[in-house]
Image: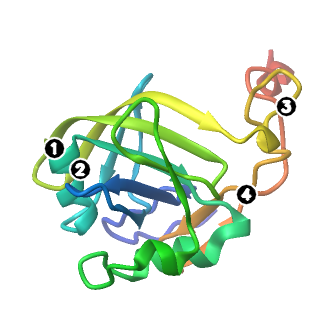
């Protein structure tokens, strides 16, 4: 194997496509597309968001949802990342997304996306990193297995390719965790 140094880049693969949902002070829903973030504890998640209508809403409501983008909704998921809620007041309507208020936090759950993490704001770090506590995970029954767990055999999240600026659907199962390595024992 021959390696080439690429410099400091945000090349962590796979990178989930997260749709951040918020309400503004008047209760209007908004959403944005974000790829830079991840789980940082058993019930904590962090997202790096910059300055957006969504971040203003998080500061006001102290809550947000993170819906995981899926292959069936790549177009509206990309749209909410391309268009600013500050410039387009009908952004959610134009995306085709509808929402239901979370039972756990003051933020919208996007009905069309089958998996949502419902979060309360813990802290804003460095002005643009939003640390949240996951209060609930809601999942559409269509992506659950017989035991009530999310299964990637029914749920098809997309990932963001930072290098190529593309979206990809996750692939096939290649092994069982906590089992595949047993072959080396």
Q: Secondary structure at mark 4?
A: loop
> Mark 2 against mark 1, which lies toward the viewer?
2
Residue under the image location 56 percent in, 67 percent down: 97
- Marks 2/1 in contact by CB < 8 Å: the verdict is yes
Q: Can the viewer see residue 93 in this picture?
A: yes
User: Mark 4 sits on what residue?
Assistant: 170
Q: Check if mark 3's residue and mark 1's residue have beta carbons within 8 Å.
A: no
Residue hosting label 3: 145
Image-based side of 122 in relation to 142, left or right: left
Q: Which residue is mark 1?
A: 124
Q: Of the residues under marks 4 and 3, which one precedes in the sequence?
A: 3
- Other residues around mark 3 within 10 Å, as few (<14) / some (14–19) / many (≥20): few
**Secondary structure of residue under mark 3:** loop
Q: Position of residue 140 (x, y in %)?
A: 71, 42
Q: Is residue 2 above or below residue 104?
A: below
Q: Residue at x 81, y 30 (%)?
A: 176
Q: Residues within 10 Å of mark 4 (few under 14, many from 20)?
A: some
Q: Nearer the viewer, mark 4 or mark 3?
A: 3
Examine the rendered structure and indicate whether residue 47 appears above or below residue 89. Answer: above
Query: How far apart are the two marked residues, 2 and 1, measured between alpha carbons?
Result: 10 Å
Q: Earlier in the sequence, mark 2 or mark 1?
A: 2
Crowd class of label 2 (few under 14; some 14 to 19; many from 20; radius 10 Å): many
Labels 1 and 4: the sequence-earlier one: 1
**Label for residue 58?**
2
Among numbered discs 3 and 2, the one appearing first in the sequence: 2
- Determine the residue positioned at 41% across, 82% down: 82
Label 1 crowding class (10 Å Cα cut-off): few <14, some 14-19, many 20+? some
Task: Residue at the far left: name it.
Answer: 126
């Amino acid at each position: 194997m021959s390696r080439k140094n690429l410099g400091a880049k945000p090349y962590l693969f796979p990178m989930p496509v997260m749709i951040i949902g918020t309400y503004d002070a008047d209760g209007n829903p908004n959403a944005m597309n974000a790829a830079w973030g991840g789980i940082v504890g058993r019930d904590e998640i962090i997202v790096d968001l910059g300055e957006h209508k969504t971040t203003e809403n998080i500061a006001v409501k102290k809550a947000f949802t993170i819906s995981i983008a899926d292959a069936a909704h790549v177009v509206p998921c990309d749209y909410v990342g391309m268009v600013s809620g500050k410039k387009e007041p009908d952004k959610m309507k134009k995306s085709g997304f509808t929402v239901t208020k979370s039972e756990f936090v003051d933020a919208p759950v996007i009905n069309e996306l089958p998996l949502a993490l419902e979060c309360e704001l813990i802290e804003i770090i460095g002005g643009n990193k939003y640390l949240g506590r996951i209060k609930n995970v809601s999942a559409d029954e269509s992506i659950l297995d017989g035991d009530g767990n999310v299964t990637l055999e029914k749920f098809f999240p997309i990932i963001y390719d930072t290098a190529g600026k593309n979206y990809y659907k996750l692939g096939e199962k290649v092994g069982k965790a906590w089992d595949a390595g047993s072959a080396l024992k």
